[in-house]
Image (cartoon, grey):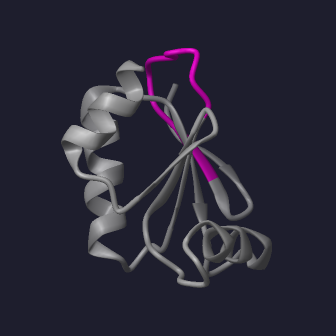
Amino acid sequence: MGQQLHGTMRTHGRQNLMKKIRVYGANWCPTTRQTLAYLDEKGIEYQYINIEEDEGASQWVKKQNHGKEIKPTLDIDGRVLSEPTEEELDDALAA
């Protein structure tokens, strides 16, 4: 599928698991980059939203994290994960 640019959002992945996955993060954030690399390695399709360029997304992240802008924060079919480990990601993707 490759990369499609949509303003501040990018869609990545080769495999559609029928799950809607959104990754909210920042390009400079090492944890965000690690999470994106892990999903890419697994061939998981996701939408990346750079919260530094999208105020609405930044506010959503803060709302999910008690006022803190934790990066990355993921929404996997309505399940919110903040700074998930690879094991937590695998569990959420398998559910």
Residue, x 35% and y 62% (percent of image)? Answer: 83
The quadrant where residue 24 appears: bottom right
Q: Position of residue 79 (x, y in %)?
A: 55, 41
Q: Position of residue 37 (x, y in %)?
A: 28, 48
Residue, x 62% and y 69% (percent of image)? Answer: 61
Q: Is residue 83 magenta?
A: no
The residue segment tinted magenta is 10-20
Residue, x 49% and y 33% (percent of image)? Answer: 2
Residue, x 21% and y 44% (percent of image)? Answer: 86
Predominant SS of the magenta segment: loop
Q: Position of residue 87 (x, y in %)?
A: 20, 39
**Residue 38 or 80: which is nearer the viewer?**
80
Q: Quadrant of the C terminus?
A: top left
User: Is residue 57 toward the left or the right of residue 76 in the image?
Assistant: right
Q: Position of residue 18 (x, y in %)?
A: 58, 15
User: Is residue 67 toward the left or the right of residue 14 in the image?
Assistant: right
For the view shown, which residue lies furthest in the front direction? 66
Q: Is residue 17 magenta?
A: yes
Would you place residue 91 above or below residue 6 in this image? above
User: Is residue 37 toward the left or the right of residue 32 in the image?
Assistant: left
Would you place residue 19 above or below residue 3 in this image? above
**Residue 79 or 57: which is nearer the viewer?**
79
The quadrant where residue 57 appears: bottom right
